[in-house]
């Protein structure tokens, strides 16, 4: 019997995932309002990090911010979803990958709008980013997307040594991206930290709901005889009973 793909395995009760997600949302939103009320208390750190924005580090930061924007991120998700579908030949896996990233990433926009924290003051930075970013700063959409991508890719790897290595590499990628965003001067460090917390708290719920609630109700995504189909049969009593 073919084993269930790791990304389709969600055993934590939905109620627990929901509680964790709600607590995460509350913490991120409350912290955002607190940071906004404190004003530019992080500017000294932002100034020090932005002073590093030259040479190779500055180039890497510019590339990250330009090439992981909304449009490139959407295109990258579509391409990666297509590759995963070609490799796994399983719409359940590909759709779970795409939906988890998209829902986790796009939902953070609501927090940005609600909190509406200003970006680091470009006039106080030694190497201000151009063009000047005028939208809300908290949380970081770039950091949210990168973290969600890493988390979902790791979720596709079976437990074991490879997964441990993937987690370590993924953590390094997320930390490096967050550092570069702070060096660019487009985000405070707390913007990046909030994005990481958001993904870790919200993504498991999104994946759990898609795998255990949505997929069983989408027959065209669920091959007959699969484990997901069995779950549907278990929760849906036969006609006549």
Image: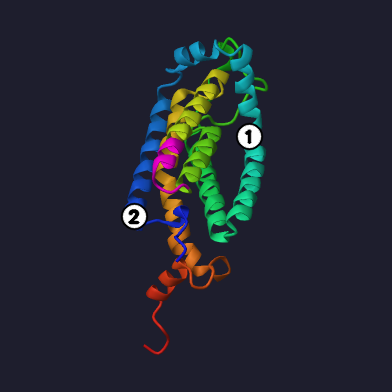
Query: Per the image, is 158 magenta?
Result: yes
Question: Residue 10 at what x, y percent from top left?
Answer: 39, 56
Residue at the (57%, 60%) spot, across then down: 90
Magenta: main secondary structure: helix
Q: Secondary structure at mark 2?
A: loop
Callout 2: 10 Å neighbours few (<14), some, many (20+)?
A: few
Nearer the observer, 176 or 162: 162
| Count of all numbered marks drawn on residues in the image | 2
200 horizontally vs 187: left or right: left
Report the mark closest to the observer, 1 or 2: 2
Q: Residues within 10 Å of mark 1 (few under 14, many from 20)?
A: few
Task: Say if the magenta span includes residue 128.
Answer: no
65 relative position to 47: left or right: right
Position of 216 relative to 126 (above/below): below
Looking at the image, is 4 positioned above or below residue 113?
A: below
Please tell me whether mark 1 sits on a helix, a strand or a loop: loop
Q: Are marks 1 and 2 in contact (CB under 8 Å)?
A: no
Quarter of the C terminus within the rendering: bottom left
- Where is residue 26 shown, x and y percent of the image? 37, 41
**Residue 185 on image: x %, y %:** 55, 19
Q: How is the image coloured?
A: rainbow
Q: Which residue is mark 2?
A: 12
- Mark identifier at residue 17: none
Residue located beneath label 1 in the image: 69
Q: Nearer the viewer, residue 196 or 124?
A: 196
Residue 64: quarter of image: top right
In the image, the segment drawn in magenta is 157-167
Where residue 210 appears, x then y in whole percent? 48, 58
The vertical placement of 104 against 170, above or below, is: below
Residue at figure coordinates x 65%, y 31% from the top left: 67
In whole angstroms, how far apart are the C-alphas of marks 1 and 2?
Answer: 33 Å
């Amino acid at each position: 019997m073919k084993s269930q793909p790791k990304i389709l395995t969600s055993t934590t009760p939905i109620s627990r995932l929901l509680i964790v997600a709600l607590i995460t949302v509350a913490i991120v939103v409350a912290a955002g309002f607190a940071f906004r009320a404190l004003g530019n208390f992080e500017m000294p750190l932002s100034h020090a990090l932005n002073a590093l924005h030259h040479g190779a580090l500055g180039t890497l930061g510019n590339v990250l911010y330009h090439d992981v924007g909304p449009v490139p991120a959407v295109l990258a998700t579509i391409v990666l979803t297509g590759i995963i579908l070609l490799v796994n030949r399983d719409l359940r896996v590909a759709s779970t990958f795409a939906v988890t990233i998209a829902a986790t990433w796009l939902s953070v926009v609501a927090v940005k709008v609600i909190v509406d924290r200003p970006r680091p003051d470009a006039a106080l930075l030694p190497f201000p980013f151009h063009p000047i970013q005028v939208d809300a700063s908290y949380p970081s959409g770039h950091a949210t997307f990168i973290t969600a991508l890493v988390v979902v890719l790791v979720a596709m790897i079976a437990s074991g040594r490879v997964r441990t290595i993937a987690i370590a590499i993924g953590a390094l990628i997320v930390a490096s991206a967050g550092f570069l965003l702070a060096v660019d001067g487009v985000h405070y460090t707390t913007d990046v930290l909030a994005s990481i917390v958001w993904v870790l708290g919200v993504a498991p719920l999104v994946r759990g709901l898609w795998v255990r609630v949505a997929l069983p109700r989408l027959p065209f995504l669920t091959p007959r005889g699969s484990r997901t189909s069995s779950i549907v049969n278990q929760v849906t009593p036969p006609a006549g009973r």
